[in-house]
Amino acid sequence: MKSNSDNNQTKLPWWVELLFVQIGLPDSWLSKYLKKKKQAINFIDENKKYIVYSIIIIAGVLYIYPIVRYTSSSTSCIDKTTKYLKSKNINNSQNEMDTNSLAVGYCHGGSLPK
């Protein structure tokens, strides 16, 4: 039969049993951890709305950043290619729109005219 003291004891979580009973880490670490855990839970409960808004904003920035980076790179390539075409007078008889079209085509995998 189990004694009355066995019924009053609660079973420790496996990580507490492993780290603090078996390995022998200092008990002060466990108390500090439990206090910080309680503070973190209280902080999250008090600021749920702001945390959700922050996550949405961060996710939006992470989603849009590659698009902005690609567009910036493409624009830079088009500007440099347009300047190159104008400096080499490759497209003398053509107007500004055709030069820009050639630059866009080159930056997206085409070739420059000779």
Image (spheres, helix red, strand yellow):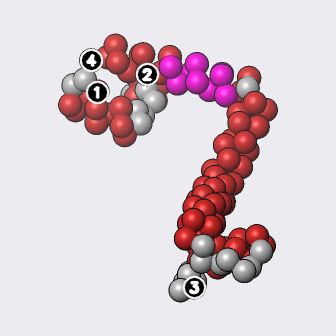
- Which residue is pictured at 27% across the width and 17% down the height? 26
Q: Amino acid at mark 2?
A: Tyr
Q: Amino acid at mark 1?
A: Phe
- Which residue is pictured at 56% across the width and 81% down the height? 112
* Depicted 45 relative to depicted 39: above or below: below
Crowd rating for badge 4 (residues with CA inside 10 Å; few <14, some 14–19, many 20+):
few
Q: Amino acid at mark 4?
A: Pro
Where does the magenta region start and end?
Answer: 36-44
Location of mark 2 (residue) = 33
For the residues labelled 4 and 2, the Cα–Cα distance comes to 11 Å
Is residue 77 shown left or right of residue 13?
Answer: right
For the residues labelled 2 and 3, the Cα–Cα distance comes to 68 Å
Spot the residue most to the top: 28
Q: Are marks 2 and 3 in contact (CB under 8 Å)?
A: no
Secondary structure state at the residue bearing disc 1: helix
Location of mark 3 (residue) = 113
- Which residue is pictured at 22% across the width and 32% down the height? 22
Q: Nearer the viewer, mark 2 or mark 1?
A: 2
Q: Which mark is residue 26?
A: 4
Q: Are marks 4 and 3 in contact (CB under 8 Å)?
A: no
Q: Amino acid at mark 3?
A: Pro
Q: Nearer the viewer, mark 3 or mark 1?
A: 3
